[in-house]
Image (cartoon, rainbow, N blue to C red):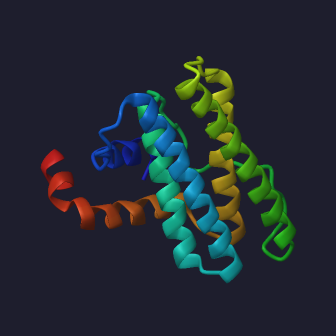
Amino acid sequence: MEFKEYQQLTNRTNFCEYPYDNKCAIMVMGMYGEFFKIIESANKNDLVRMENVLGDILWYMSEYYTLRKYELKSAEPSYKLVGTKETRSAMDLGVILLDFNYKLSSLQNMVKRAWICEEEINKSFEIDLLNDIHSCIGAICFIYELNVRNIMKKNIKKLELHYKDFLQNEE
């Protein structure tokens, strides 16, 4: 599954009726809330939960991209992480999670300023942050040997259980 298809499908499940700026803030806060579940899943080495949480973050990202009229081109984020399964360590994950937290925090602050202070969002910086967040997801997948496309497929199946009639009627 490519991200564009994922984005189109997930958009059918967003029933948030807040004004535009509020929706962007809600999507970023949702990503942030899920981020803490990644830490919890990593601490428990719970890969099933990790996949679910990453799928939820991708849902929030997808909705944010849709609101901002962006399209993420790749379903496989890249991250400058080298090594093999044998050389991956908790330190790698710690660095990635710190980076992930920093990027999410920066995006959250940018969206809050735009919403509260009615500032223009620096699109170039915003896209860089989004790409970096996407790369952090890719790095987490690399460490845990997860596949982003499979995570998206599983998340769509989960969404179909909750929004079955709506997703089927839109096809």
13 relative to 158, above or below: above
Q: Residue 38 sits in which quadrant?
A: bottom right
Q: How many marks?
A: 0
In this orientation, which residue lies closer to the viewer: 9 or 73?
A: 9
Residue at the spot x=54%, y=61% of the render?
54
Q: Position of residue 159 (x, y in %)?
A: 32, 61
Residue at the spot x=45%, y=29% of the render?
21
Name the residue at the front extreme.
116
**Position of 40 compared to 94: left or right?**
left
**Position of 107 compared to 23: left or right?**
right
Residue at the spot x=70%, y=38% of the render?
106
Q: Position of residue 49 (x, y in %)?
A: 53, 75
Q: Position of residue 29 (x, y in %)?
A: 54, 48
Q: Is residue 151 visible?
A: yes
Q: Position of residue 71 (x, y in %)?
A: 48, 33
7 relative to 119, above or below: below
Q: Residue 132 sits in which quadrant?
A: top right
Residue at the spot x=87%, y=72% of the render?
87
Q: Is residue 88 visible?
A: no
Q: Residue 144 sits in which quadrant?
A: bottom right
